[in-house]
Amino acid sequence: MAVLPVVTFPDPVLRQRCKEVTAFDADLHKLLDDMGQTMATAEGIGLAANQVGDLRRLFLMDVHIDDNTRTGLLEIVNPRIVAKRGEVRFEEGCLSFPGVFEFVVRANEIELHYQDRTGAAHKIICRGMVAICAQHEYDHLEGVTFIDRLSPLKRQLALRDYDRRNREALDDKTARAKARARRQPPQQIS
Ligand code: CO
């Protein structure tokens, strides 16, 4: 198993639609295993395949329902949301938008049909946090991010903050690299 690099906005792979999984083989299992380790390491509650640069139609969830209950690791392949009920507003974050947290309105209950890693079909009802997470991850598979669910103004403000933070982080990195370069002895050319 390996921890994969998580792609961050504005990487174009986040805008791509993931394709139906047809091969339930060792390669799929490796991707799911690696994504499981990646999500646990990043302490995320959900991770979609295109967030690690793979365009297979699948995501993972491991959601805390309350202080004592969590779903455990769910591997959701070829998901379909077949029903939505109610409405809930929750402040979401995303591993692909470090530091961004915004309120998004979603359905409070969904009926989710999917396949597991063996190809077996499942139908579950998700509520509350599990429903929120499943809809957020499902959106990723459609090339949609939670930022797209905001009003144009909110989105503009969130992205301006995000860009500024990234620029500052980059400036820090450049300053550190320059300091390192100054410390290097001159190269011997012979
Ligand atoms: Co996300």
Image (cartoon, rainbow, N blue to C red):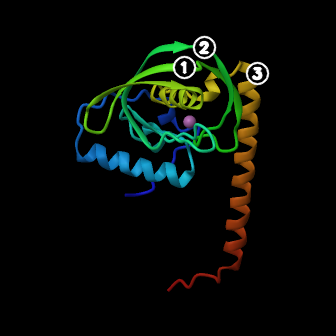
The residue beneath circle 3 is: 153
Q: Name the N-terminal-most of marks 1 and 2.
A: 2
Q: Nearer the viewer, residue 53 or 36?
A: 36
Q: CA distance from mark 1 to mark 2?
A: 6 Å
Kindly state the secondary structure of the residue where label 3 is placed: helix
The residue beneath circle 2 is: 86
Residues at marks 1 and 2 touching, judged by CB atoms closer than 8 Å: yes
The residue beneath circle 1 is: 109
Quarter of the rendering containing residue 59: top left
Measured as percent of width and height from the top left, residue 57 is found at 37, 31
Quarter of the rendering containing residue 113: top left
Q: Name the N-terminal-most of marks 3 and 2.
A: 2
Displayed-image quarter of ligand 1: top right
| In this view, 189 is above or below 112 | below
Q: CA distance from mark 3 to mark 2?
A: 25 Å
Measured as percent of width and height from the top left, residue 125 is found at 46, 23
Quarter of the rendering containing residue 58: top left
Residue 110 seen anywhere in this rendered image of the structure:
yes
Which amino acid type corresponds to the residue marked 1 in the rendered image? Glu
Kindly state the secondary structure of the residue where label 2 is placed: loop
